[in-house]
């Protein structure tokens, strides 16, 4: 399939919208666009961060998922209490693959779930007393935990519990931080508000703990923000920063610790990978501690080299030379990876639908392999994400915000990409359609994908997805070739 | 650094020296407690003292072995023909339910949310229901929409029945479009309760006011009600038995097709499932067999009260005796003898038991999972001469407890077993340290206990055998069968080979333990 031109892409959007009832059609039309690189801002062309329409099968999650699942879960020495009914804690356990190094149940708690398992009486009479007792129980069984967070599920905000008061009281009693997080799932329109609420909770309850007590820090101290160490991403990034001479004081939040949060105010530069989920705290630190921050992109050698140089530009020649040394060191390995995989992937078309960052951040990595992104969209991006996106994508690329199950399937049916990168909810429908697929939230149980070492895994994985023989066997020999699956027809 | 010809993913990449150095350097920023203190504390968590503290918990659940109601409601809805599951409440819940089933079944799961947000929490969710039903019917070509709820709708007290009624009146959805519903508050019971509620809701919707002219026995069929059932083979084995016996039946709720569609190049959102006509005709059956009898209270009440069925008092048809009882009962109520082919199958299972008993006899196994499943599994273990040790059911009820106790007391292999109703997997972790079983049998969540026990030393490791729900970390096991004699064969094969695998693992050291590394076992 050749890439759609602008008119074809616009026609496709119109065609897909046709099925909606009038009100839904009008709303959905605002969330779909064809890219135009000339645009200064995305605002006029696409609407984002708005309520999902009822009944259309949005792929979005909730504030709790953004808070507990994304931001808090990966901090390893904090125990996150899923406060409310049992489900949320159970469903959010162990799916995101944010790796940590530690002893589970003793000094690390990432792969466990802690729930107040609300019963009817808790909803009727309130859960504050239960929460207070529960914190004591946590403390008695896990004395080496460094802090506790209270992740509110929907009922908490509806029944008027005062988790802030309980948290303050218990924090004083146990001598550890107890952080209330108001991330009830009905707040906001997606995971995104959960990120914001979590950033704010860290701002209000943790980050200033050592104000006035921190040493000045070294000249090369930096922090990684917005890397959740999925499949070890943050480790594969950290190694490069260290090799160029930087001291990585903190990782937020993959494999991170409460001490790292508290020490971050002494860094010289905050490095922000996932802009969407952690720009808030970066801005706060800029304002309060005058720490500059910059976005970087560690997907694929082109973007990594660009990022390393840009990071180095904030420092002296030692670091600038360090960056060049790192780029040079890995260059032959990167060339070997590209030599190996590019011939197998050249010209392949990719459609992406992920959270708030990767649909634009991974474009360079695909291009390094000779691939082309022909459609991209986000579950929970905001306007500032789309501003960045229109610059990173080619003209006439299809862009979709909060896409529904129906839209994604139709777009893929018509565009016939060689690969779809999205989430587990989308994955199996595309498998049935014969479209090679990689999960781009969890790295499909692989990873890391960040950094030079990660790019090697990324290239390997994209190759295995597209070139595995399974996609060629959909039709029995006695079935008509006219029914050939999408992948074959491509 | 990676090498192009041997690209390493996370493991073993991070085990290399260069990454171990990265982790060591990172540690200097972490201000962690000393390794000695960590080691000491870990040891403490393996003690009886810690277990006592652990069992003294009254408010905190750690590592649950249950989920919430709407998950079960949603699975139930999937079992009906061209039915879209619609969940009234927050959208995040629905993303979680879909994900949970995606990971277990490795299949697409289509559920819809009506995305209640803050304004709906204040003003109620009627607008969401109206718009949601309108969009869902337009977009997804369903014959039925099965509605259940998340806790936001339950806490604010949304009147689902009225909302749906108003949606019809105001033209958001056709007047006669079938929309059964159930309240499935997540702060009551668990996913199995939600299945019961949704099922009752669907039966109620189609039959409560349509009982005229209906009476037990009129259609000559029997009804089969599976309960929260995730083994696809279990739907199929019961159907096969019915077919072999020539028994006409209606499977009330059958998601075995939609959860197992072929890769053809097209994605079909719907496949198979119980039809509305079958549901309407269900009261005319001779009777209704409930495969998970301790957890379908509401359904039972409705079927007995409204359909006037005399529901046979049976336990889950797992293992030999309880399958015998099930088949005999089916034979009794239908007048059709148990098919010779089934008797042959039974004989094959018994034959397998004679072949394998020497490896299973006296083995100690801890078990966790849903109530009826666990009871059936334990019953079969007792038939195999296995000694169940710790029986953990996070979502148990009193009825189950009593029945479970009776099962254990009926066998010399069960007398040492202890039941832990309402307990979770952190309780089970303690038990695996202080009173070590040979194996744990349960869902993927058990793997963390295996890891933790191994950390204490290889001799303390309790390996996990994966039978149950959910199984996220092994492929395609959900297609297997645990019910009937066929299910017995699968369970037996799984258990005995786990024992043998373990023995090989322990004896494969060359020149050290390999005197017992036998070619023939």
Image (cartoon, rainbow, N blue to C red):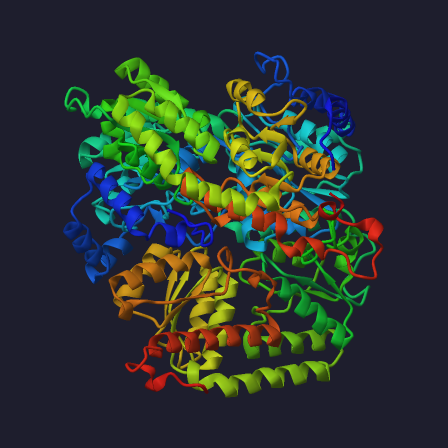
Question: Where residue B253 sits in the image (x, y, percent)?
Answer: 68, 56
- Could you say which is closer to the camera, residue A20 or residue B291? A20
- Could you say which is closer to the camera, residue B108 or residue A336? A336
Say above or below: B15 vs B293. Answer: above
Placement of the C terminus of chain A among the 4 image quadrants: top right
Question: Where residue B325 sits in the image (x, y, percent)?
Answer: 61, 77
Q: Residue at x 75, y 76 (%)?
A: B244
Say above or below: A33 vs A60. Answer: above
Say above or below: B255 vs A341. Answer: below
Rendered image quadrant of residue A259? top left
Q: Is residue B280 left or right of residue B122?
A: right
Observer able to see residue A119: no
Q: Is residue A430 left or right of residue A327?
A: right
Q: Residue at x 75, y 42 (%)?
A: B142
Question: Where residue B137 sits in the image (x, y, percent)?
Answer: 75, 35
Rendered image quadrant of residue A241? top left
Q: Residue at x 74, y 48 (%)?
A: A488
């Amino acid at each position: 399939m050749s890439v759609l031109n602008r008119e074809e892409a616009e026609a496709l959007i119109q065609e897909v919208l046709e099925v909606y009832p009038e009100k839904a059609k009008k709303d959905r039309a605002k969330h779909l666009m064809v890219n135009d690189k000339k645009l200064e801002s995305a605002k006029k062309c696409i609407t984002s961060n708005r309520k999902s329409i009822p009944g259309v099968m949005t792929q979005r999650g909730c504030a709790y998922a953004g808070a507990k699942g994304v931001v808090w879960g990966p901090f390893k020495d904090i125990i996150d209490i899923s406060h409310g009914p049992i489900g949320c804690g159970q469903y959010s356990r162990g799916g995101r693959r944010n790796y940590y190094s530690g002893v589970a149940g003793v000094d690390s708690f990432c792969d466990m779930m802690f729930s107040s398992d609300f019963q009817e009486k808790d909803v009727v009479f309130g859960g504050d007393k239960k929460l207070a007792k529960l914190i004591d129980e946590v403390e008695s069984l896990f004395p080496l935990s460094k802090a506790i967070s209270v992740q509110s599920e929907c009922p908490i905000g509806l029944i008027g519990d005062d988790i802030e008061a309980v948290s303050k009281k218990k924090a004083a009693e146990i001598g550890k931080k107890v952080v209330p997080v108001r991330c009830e799932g009905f707040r906001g329109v997606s995971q995104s508000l959960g990120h914001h609420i979590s950033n704010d909770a860290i701002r209000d309850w943790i980050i200033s703990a050592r104000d006035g007590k921190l040493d000045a820090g070294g000249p090369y101290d930096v922090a990684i923000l917005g890397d959740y160490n999925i499949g070890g991403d943050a480790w594969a990034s950290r190694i490069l920063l260290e090799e160029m001479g930087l001291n990585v004081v903190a990782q937020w939040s993959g494999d991170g610790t409460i001490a790292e949060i508290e020490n971050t105010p002494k860094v010289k530069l905050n490095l922000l990978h996932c802009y969407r989920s952690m720009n808030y705290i970066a801005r706060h630190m800029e304002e309060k501690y005058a720490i500059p921050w910059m976005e970087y992109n560690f997907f694929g050698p082109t973007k990594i080299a660009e990022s390393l140089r840009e990071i180095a530009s904030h420092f002296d020649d030692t670091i600038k030379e360090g960056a060049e040394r790192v780029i040079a060191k890995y260059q032959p390995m990167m060339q070997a990876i590209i030599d190996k995989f590019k011939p197998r992937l050249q010209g392949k078309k990719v459609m992406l639908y992920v959270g708030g960052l990767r649909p634009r951040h991974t474009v360079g990595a695909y291009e390094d392999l000779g691939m082309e992104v022909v459609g991209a969209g986000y579950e929970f991006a905001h306007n500032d994400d789309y501003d960045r996106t229109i610059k990173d994508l080619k003209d006439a690329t299809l862009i979709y915000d909060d896409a529904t199950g129906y839209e994604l399937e139709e777009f893929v049916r018509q565009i016939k990409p060689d690969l779809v990168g999205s989430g587990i909810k989308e994955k199996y429908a595309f498998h049935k359609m014969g479209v090679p697929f990689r999960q781009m939230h969890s790295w499909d149980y692989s990873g890391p994908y960040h950094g030079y070492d990660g790019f090697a895994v990324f290239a390997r994985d994209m190759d295995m997805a597209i070139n595995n023989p399974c996609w060629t066997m959909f039709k029995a020999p006695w079935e008509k070739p006219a029914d050939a699956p999408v992948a074959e027809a491509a | 650094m990676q090498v192009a010809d041997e690209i390493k993913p996370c493991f073993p990449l991070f085990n290399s020296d260069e990454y171990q150095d990265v982790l060591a350097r990172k540690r200097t920023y972490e201000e962690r407690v000393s390794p000695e203190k960590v080691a000491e504390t870990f040891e403490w968590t393996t003690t009886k003292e810690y277990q006592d503290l652990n069992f003294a918990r009254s408010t905190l659940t750690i590592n649950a072995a249950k989920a919430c109601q709407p998950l079960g409601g949603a699975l139930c809805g999937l079992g009906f023909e061209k039915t879209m599951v619609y969940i009234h409440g927050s959208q995040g819940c629905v993303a979680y339910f879909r994900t949970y089933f995606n990971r277990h079944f490795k299949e697409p799961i289509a559920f819809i949310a009506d995305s209640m947000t803050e304004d709906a929490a204040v003003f109620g969710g009627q607008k969401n229901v109206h718009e949601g039903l309108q969009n869902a019917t337009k977009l997804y070509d369903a014959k039925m929409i099965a509605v259940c709820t998340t806790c936001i709708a339950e806490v604010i007290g949304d009147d689902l029945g009225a909302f749906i009624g108003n949606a019809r009146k105001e033209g958001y959805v056709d007047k006669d479009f079938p929309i059964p519903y159930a309240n499935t508050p997540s702060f009551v019971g668990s996913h199995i309760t939600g299945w019961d509620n949704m099922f009752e809701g669907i039966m109620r919707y189609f039959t409560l006011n349509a009982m005229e002219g209906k009476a037990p026995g009129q259609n000559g069929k029997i009804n089969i009600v599976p309960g929260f059932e995730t083994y696809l083979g279990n739907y199929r084995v019961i159907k096969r038995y019915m077919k072999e016996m020539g028994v006409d039946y209606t499977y009330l709720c059958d998601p075995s097709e939609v959860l197992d569609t072929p890769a053809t190049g097209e994605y079909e959102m719907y496949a198979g499932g119980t039809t509305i006509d079958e549901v309407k005709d269900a009261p005319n059956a001779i009777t209704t067999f409930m495969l998970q009898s301790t957890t379908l209270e509401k359904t039972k009440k409705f079927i007995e009260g409204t359909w006037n069925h005399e529901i046979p008092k049976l336990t889950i048809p797992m293992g030999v005796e309880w399958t015998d009882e099930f088949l005999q009962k089916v034979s009794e109520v239908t007048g059709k003898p148990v098919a010779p082919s089934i008797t042959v199958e039974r004989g094959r299972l018994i034959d397998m038991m004679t072949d394998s008993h020497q490896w299973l006899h006296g083995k100690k196994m801890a078990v966790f999972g849903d109530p009826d499943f666990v009871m059936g599994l334990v019953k079969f273990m007792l038939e195999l001469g296995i000694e169940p040790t710790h029986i953990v059911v996070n979502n148990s009820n009193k009825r189950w407890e009593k029945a479970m106790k009776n099962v254990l007391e009926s066998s010399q292999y069960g007398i040492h077993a202890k039941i832990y109703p309402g307990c979770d997997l952190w309780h089970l972790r303690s038990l695996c340290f202080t009173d070590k079983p040979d194996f744990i049998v349960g869902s993927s969540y058990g793997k963390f206990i295996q890891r933790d026990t191994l950390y204490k030393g290889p001799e303390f490791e309790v390996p996990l055998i994966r039978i149950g729900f959910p199984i996220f970390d092994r492929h395609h096991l959900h297609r297997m069968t645990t019910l009937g004699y066929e299910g017995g064969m699968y369970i037996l094969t799984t258990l005995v080979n786990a024992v043998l695998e373990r023995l090989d693992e322990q004896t494969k050291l060359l020149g050290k333990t390999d005197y017992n590394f036998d070619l023939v076992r």
